[in-house]
Image: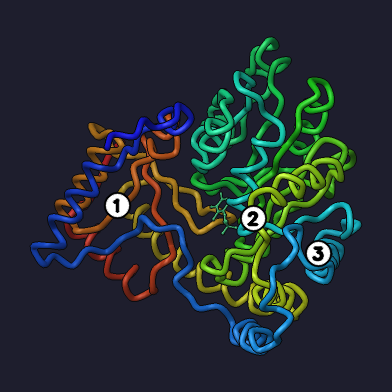
Amino acid sequence: MPFAEAQRIKNLPPYLFARIEKLIADKKAAGVDIISLGIGDPDLPTPDYIIDELCRQARVAENHQYPSSVGLLSYRQAVADWYKQRFGVELDPKTQVVSLIGSKEGIAHISWCYLDPGDIVLVPDPGYPVYAGGAILAGAQPYYMPLTRENGFLPDLDAIPADIARRAKMMFINYPNNPTGAVADDAFYRRVIDFAREYNILVCHDAAYSEVSYDGYRPPSFLQFPGASEVGIEFNSVSKAYNMTGWRIGWAAGNPAVVEALGRLKSNLDSGQFQAVQYAAIAGLTAPQDFVFQMQKVYQERRDMLVNALNEMGWQLEKPRATFYIWAPVPKGYTSESFAEAVLEKAAVVVTPGTGYGPSGAGYVRMSLTLPTARLEEAVERLKKHIGPVSF
Ligand SMILES: *Cc1c(COP(=O)(O)O)cnc(C)c1O
């Protein structure tokens, strides 16, 4: 029976990688050993003390019942304490923190709280596809803010036409940034807060990579800047900090009215996250943060290995100060897609075409550091051997 899909799902952007995924599947079927630098998901395990807490709490009968959709108060308190310790930010756990089933869940759903059909939302391009996807599902219209190398991969707020800024109800920003690896300085956050005040725009800052940074750099929280909690919220989770992407536990924090609206929406959609998982996340957030620094060290070594090799081949990449991504321009004569296909054909290595993250991703590919170091070494050898010197 043909069921007509709702317009909101028909409006979602088409899936771009069908062609390259077919090529990958064909190669795998032919027995080729493919190394993927395409996946942004930590390869290292969750620390034992977090797993132990899950196991303990899974045996507690009261955890087997429905949790609340906004999260245990002790979980929200742990998030607030972490903000205090990490950023010096004071949050009221009762009114300024809501638990999420991973930050992706909240990022997708916030649009349902604040966007009506036809409304405009400012979205970074390239960017995490969920910003535009959630907005489109709410019937809203993304306005893409290009992130260019010339602007340090920060949106140029002055380039947003005044009529668009006036009509925009929300803006997504994300630093440290996926996919570009860029970080934002304090002046940028202050400028965003001024802009949001001027045009009455709700700022949604995605801080998913706040703990994945190098060379001693510690990314700030949006919420530590004066006025941030008046104009916005911050999304984050334990996913990237403690290798817990599969556990699905995160939060939104900041503006109380926005936190309340998100919680109210969620009470109509879900019943929150398994309490044992919330207790495990508390264990991660409240333990000494040594684990985070060990993780940073592993990625930093991988980053140095990959960037140094690419630069020997002719790239002129700066080492990203955060995230586990390398955002590399494609050599002369290639598009994002044709270069990704060439790398797959010649080296059996998967890199992601930048266009998967928005039109301004054209001319770039993203390479991820989330694979065992020995496999990354092998990928580097293959690139040197089969792609060789490149020019731009
Ligand atoms: C990984 C990621 C997230 C979401 O992670 P959750 O596991 O849902 O918390 C959010 N934003 C960006 C940019 C990411 O890369």
**Which sits in the foreground, 257 or 266?**
266
**Which sits in the foreground, 69 or 36?**
69
**Which sits in the foreground, 177 or 256?**
256
Marks 1 and 2, how far apart in space?
50 Å
Query: Is ligand 1 closer than 8 angstroms to the Cβ of mark 3?
Result: no
At x 32%, y 51%, the residue is 351
Q: Secondary structure at mark 1?
A: helix
Q: Is residue 176 visible?
A: yes
Front of the two marks 2 and 3: 2
Front of the two marks 1 and 2: 2
Q: Describe residue 4's horizontal placement relative to residue 207 as left or right.
A: left
Residue with the mark numbered 3: 76
Quadrant housing the N terminus: top left
For the residue marked with disc 3, what is the amino acid? Arg
Q: Is residue 97 above or below residue 256?
A: below
Name which quarter of the figure residue 332 lies in: top left
Q: Of callouts 3 and 1, which one flags the residue occurring earlier in the amino acid sequence? A: 3
At x 51%, y 73%, the residue is 298
Residue with the mark numbered 2: 270
Marks 2 and 3, how far apart in space?
17 Å
For the residue marked with disc 2, what is the amino acid? Asp
Front of the two marks 3 and 1: 3
Residue with the mark numbered 1: 313
At x 50%, y 49%, the residue is 318
Q: Is residue 355 above or below residue 30?
A: above
Q: Position of residue 289 (x, y in %)?
A: 71, 76
Q: Label 1: how many residues lie within 10 Å, few (<14), some (14-19) or many (20+)?
A: some
For the residue marked with disc 1, what is the amino acid? Met
Residue extending farthest to the top is 163
Image quadrant of ligand 1 equals: bottom right
